[in-house]
Image (spheres, helix red, strand yellow):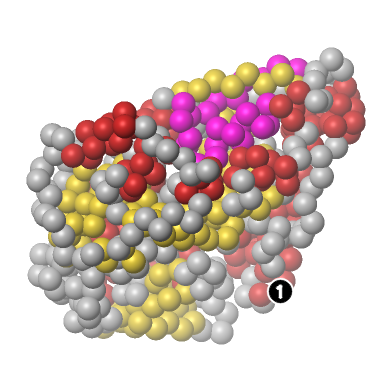
Amino acid sequence: MKKQYSPLILALVILVLGVSQPSRAAECVRVVGYEPWTGQQTIDPAFNTIQTDVQLIMALYEPLIWVDNNFGLVPRLAKSWEANADGTVWTFKLQEGVKFHDGSDFDAEDVVYTYRRLIAEETASPASAVLGFLTAEGIEAVDSHTVKFTANTPTAELPFLLSNKFALIVSSDDTTAQIKNKANGTGPFTLDEFSPAAVRLVMHANPSYWQEGLPKSDCLELSSIAESVARAAAVMAGQADVLLAVDASTVISLGDDAKVTIAKTEAGPLMMMWMMTDVAPYDDVRVRKAMKLVIDREKMVELALLGYGSPGNDNPIPPSSPAAYRSDVIQQDIPQAKALLAEAGYPNGLKVDLYTGATDLYPGTLVMVQAYKEMASEAGIDVTIIPAPNDSYWDEIWMKKPFTSLYWSLRPPSSALPIAYTSDAPYNGTHWYNKEFDNLVATASKTVDADKRGDLYREAQRLLAEDGGHILPMFSSVVSLMREGCSGFQPHTSVNRVQYQEIHCD
């Protein structure tokens, strides 16, 4: 039976999206996200940290290289690139005839300015952790449409690392203050005025966009609804055209409803729980191992994601990936979990608090933590779930409380491992410091031979899974909805990448 949305929910959706807002042009495509707009979002790519930032910035700015759903590299503002024999010097040829929104020409100086700004200490962008192989002197314009990057070590995956979510090209004429307040990218849409306090933003097609025939819509309207049922009801009520993500239960309830088109990826966002390894009881590796062994991972995928996902092995690479350290799935082992807890001094079990969002941080989060609570109880672990407001979760809970739930974007090993798990990682929320792991990741990043590099990354994954404070039971598919009459939107395995230029609605 298909889910019926109550008149109250439909009325609330219409109120949220249609009242006390600037009038919208009829031709606007209305795209709705899933994280609440809190007044903290930014349009500065250097600080593109949360999903609401991604939702806005990806319409306005572009990278040198796009990454497809299989992590293949696709030319964007860079049309080609090549490296020297040892991977220390990379030369990029840039697209010609590209203009920024203010009418100025895009050239090599803009690329140099963008990357020097990202790695500058005074900028304090999280991108600096991913771009540690670069120095300001190693980024130079060869001519107006050629840029050379000289890495301080061999960097075999430099093109992919350059394409991180912060590395969207800004104009060399714009200061940080200007970038913060006025969008001036090369992207398919333009924004006349930005206010962090806005709950809805209307953007217009870039009349000088360099890709012929794009964007396919004259206007783009971006907003967000955090509650999953209300989000789906917005499409059914004709108040939204595209939903960036919906939960699996909504997909099942819609069945074969002709009013919507469902699009999905394979393994996508990492669904996780993080323990601070310097806070008791998580400072004991035996406790950490026990808290991982209580999980029936296949069952959790069915419960929380209704099959729209795949199991994980407590590291950021899916077991189905050729880059994974193991292809089988860690099995639940309650007797071993109990034995480890007893060895650690908890023969009668222990009590822990698990913080999560009051509503789904990402579709399926709440069911995941409830399922974890039930599974952990079999080993004597009493989990108290503490819900916190979503609009302040990332500022007040994540990386501040010792045991939290979260989701993360899918990345390959070269960027997934250093961004959150090395000792100097900007998002090392588990406070896990392992020199052997650090050395493996650092050595892998310098290793040109692909097979040897892969082996190093796989060994690093094993260490993280067995010793780290990172519980990753599953990867979610990204499931999106489009209303009848709309086409051109495909979700990405990485929620940090969104493309709007192909969307068209009748």
Q: Could you tell me which residue is drawn at 61 percent across and 40 percent down? A: 304
Instruction: Find residue 258 and report its image quarter.
Output: bottom left
Please name whichever residue, 97 or 33, is drawn nearer the observer in this view of the structure: 33
- The percent coordinates of residue 178 (x first, y second) are 15, 51
Instruction: Find residue 288 and report its image quarter.
Output: top right
Q: Height in image: 59 above or below 86?
A: above
Q: Is residue 481 left or right of residue 370?
A: left
The three-letter amino acid code for the residue at tag 1 is Asp
Q: Is residue 401 left or right of residue 140?
A: right
Q: Height in image: 151 above or below 379?
A: below
Is residue 408 visible in the rendered image? The answer is: no
**Residue at the front extreme, as displayed:** 1
Q: Could you tell me which residue is drawn at 61 percent across and 52 percent down? A: 309
- The percent coordinates of residue 399 (x first, y second) are 51, 32
User: Which segment is the magenta one?
Assistant: 350-373
- The percent coordinates of residue 278 (x first, y second) are 65, 28
The reply to whether the magenta stretch includes residue 489 is no
Image quadrant holding the C terminus, namely bottom left
Q: How many marks?
A: 1
Crowding at dot 1, Cα within 10 Å, few <14 / some 14-19 / many 20+, comes out as few
Q: Could you tell me which residue is drawn at 79 percent across and 56 percent down? A: 328
Q: Could you tell me which residue is drawn at 55 percent across and 54 percent down? A: 477
User: Can you identify the residue that label 1 sits on?
Assistant: 451
Is residue 398 visible in the rendered image? The answer is: yes
- The percent coordinates of residue 148 (x first, y second) are 37, 77
The reply to whether the magenta stretch includes residue 367 is yes
Please name whichever residue, 308 or 11, is drawn nearer the observer in this view of the structure: 11
Q: Is residue 318 left or right of residue 245?
A: right
Please name whichever residue, 351 or 267, is drawn nearer the observer in this view of the structure: 267
Secondary element type, mark 1: helix
Q: Is residue 376 left or right of residue 127?
A: right
